[in-house]
Amino acid sequence: MNFDLTQTLIDLTLQYGPKLILSVIVLFVGLKIIKLLTLTIEKILNKKDIDLTLRPFIISFSNVLLKVLLTISVLSMVGVEMTSFIAILGAAGLAIGMALSGTLQNFAGGVMILLFKPYKAGDYIEAQGFAGTVNEVQIFNTILKTPDNKTIIIPNGALSNSSLINYSTEKQRRVDWTFRISYGDDLNKAKELLKRFCEEDKRILTEPAPAILLSNLADSSVNISVRAWVNSSDYWNVLWDMNERVYKEFDSHNLNIPFPQMALHVHNK
């Protein structure tokens, strides 16, 4: 019996020993290669200026994927049947994917946003019925801060699959106003006054030159449109300052800003 046991051990050693030694060597060398590949991927991401939020994920995902492939290869070399294992792993992956479909969609959207950068931290955007400054772009969500300091969290899946407005992409923006004067007021005086206001505000660019146009003859007012170009950072201050100046100075130049009125006529029969 002892002889049979010894012979069996010898047979197993001769059968699996070389495979085991070879698999250990492959595992050791493979881990070294994976480490080098991970460092190479990290260097490439740094050179390509990939977003800081995305770099750790890409590096970790690549590292885990390579190690899983290495493990499967090593087990196959030893003689472990991998067909059933891969089938079970695939079925588990499918079940997890279906359960986390929304989360995976947000993840995919986050990757697309971080790669193609339709917006970045610090940009003022409008999307999904919300508007605010991008505070942080995470892998699953984008966090906005509103001007009144509210925090808005929007899933990246929705942002990557719908339209959005990025107000910070261009260095310059056009400010549009519509000012109203009463019928009978001096139109030329109003246009000259608005032109002077634009010239005196040094934040308003001279090229392209401001446009001052009679845009509409409304029911109770003559509407004058003013279009001026400014640096994006000056947009809101220029808009508000011009509104205030027109309100304060039109009256002193006999220019009336009309408001909706209703005339009621009573007839006695």
Image: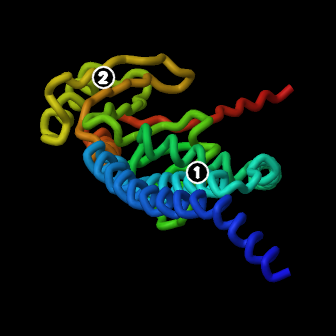
Instruction: Locate residue 122 relative to residue 95 in the image: left or right.
Output: left
Estimate the x, y position of residue 92 in percent, counting from the top left: 80, 54
Please name the residue that numbered disc 2 is placed on: 186
**Where residue 48 appears, x then y in whole percent?**
30, 43
Q: Is residue 212 visible?
A: yes
| Vertical comparison of 83 with 32: above or below | above
Q: CA distance from mark 1 to mark 2?
A: 81 Å
Q: Identify the image quadrant of residue 169.
A: top left
Label ID, residue 148: none
* Picture quarter with the C terminus: top right
Residue ID for mark 1? 69
Mark 2 is surrounded, within 10 Å at the Cα level, by few (under 14), some (14 to 19) or many (20 or more) other residues, namely some
Rendered-image quadrant of the N terminus: bottom right
User: For mark 1, does the 10 Å Cα neighbourhood hold few (<14), some (14 to 19), or many (20 or more) residues?
Assistant: few
- Amino acid at the residue labelled 2: Asp
- Which structural element holds mark 1? helix
Residue 234: in sight, yes or no?
no
- In the rendering, at what x and y percent does residue 69 appear? 58, 51
